[in-house]
Amino acid sequence: MANCDTCEREVALDDNFCCSCGTELCHETIAIKYYFKQGYEYNTIVEFLCKFHGISMCVRTLKNRLKMLGLGRKSMDFNEQEVRERIMREIDGPGSMSGYRSMLHTLQREGYMVPRQTLEDLLKELDPRKILWLQLSRSNNNPQVILRLLLNAVDACGGCPRKLRSDCGTENGLAAATQCYFTNNEQAHIYGTSPHNQRIEGWWSYFRRSRANWWINFFKDLMEREVFTTGNDLEMSSVPHEQQKLSSSATSRSQVSQFAMF
Ligand SMILES: [Zn+2]
């Protein structure tokens, strides 16, 4: 749905007249405003106009039209405090797992034309959390493996975290004790129930959808072609651990570290 120029009520993109105020609608203007407010790039808007409305124009013409409609992206003013509050609401709510692009799109859809650099700076300030390290291992129930990963990270970062949270599994016992020893504070480690770990759980699910699924399907395909059998220990040592859902192969590890660097 788009909006009528005169009364701002909703109209369909192919309506000839506004059913609220009766004004004759200009398809081109309605479509341009609609796609612009949805946050599409100029090139995409030009393609949509051609494909769905039979209107052909070049990007330069589109920019001129937008300027005449008072919709220049760079010139658009926005209230920083308002944007700040909107971002905070998004971070505290269901949008907490979304990244920079998704946040930009949400703001654009609501009419906030925030320059990319400004949004990046605001996000760094309002949500400075980032992944410092992320590692995969074949075993997820050996306390020594978990401890080794933590020690490697402490060594690489040159310091330990102020707080460490893990789930209640026995595999986290050594890491918990070491964290309390490092900080000389028995409160420095907390056992969180799984609902409290939803941020990282949400991240895993995102990672699985965006990166790991390819590997899972790859190995499933090998099994179907009988190139690989799950009963063979040697072959199993190079594929995803069923419980961990992710592969410990060097390639998959590099996928994870690429993700962590981002
Ligand atoms: Zn109207």
Image (cartoon, rainbow, N blue to C red):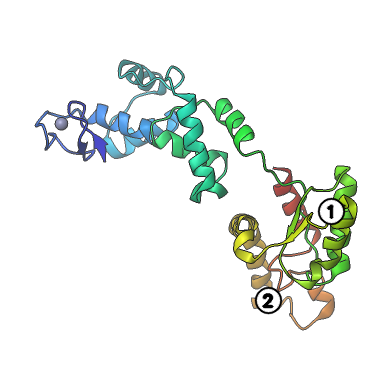
User: How dense is the environment of label 1, judged by Cα within 10 Å: few (below 14), some, or many (20 and up)?
Assistant: few
Q: Amino acid at mark 1?
A: Asn
Give the left or right position of residue 175, taking residue 221 as reference: right
- Residue extending farthest bottom: 231
Q: Nearer the viewer, residue 226 or 162?
A: 162
Q: Amino acid at mark 2?
A: Met
In this view, the mark in front (1 or 2): 1
Give the left or right position of residue 62, taking residue 164 as reference: left
Report the residue marked by disc 2: 223
Question: 34 above or below 76?
Answer: below
Which disc, if any, is residue 198?
none
Report the residue marked by disc 1: 185
Q: Give the position of the N terminus as an image quadrant.
A: top left
Q: Position of residue 178 (x, y in %)?
A: 88, 59
Q: Residue at x 84, y 48 (%)?
A: 160
Q: Residue at x 72, y 53 (%)?
A: 255
Q: Position of residue 148 (x, y in %)?
A: 89, 60
Residue 140 position by quadrant: bottom right
Q: Position of residue 245 (x, y in %)?
A: 68, 68
Chain-order first, disc 1 or disc 2:
1
Q: Residue at x 59, y 63 (%)?
A: 195
The quadrant of the rendered image in which ligand 1 is seen is top left
Q: Nearer the viewer, residue 167 or 64?
A: 167
Check disc 2 and report its element: helix, strand or loop: helix
CA–CA distance in space, label 1 to label 2:
49 Å
Residue 138 visible within the image: no
- Residue extending farthest left: 22
Question: 195 above or below 236?
Answer: above
Q: Position of residue 211 (x, y in %)?
A: 64, 56
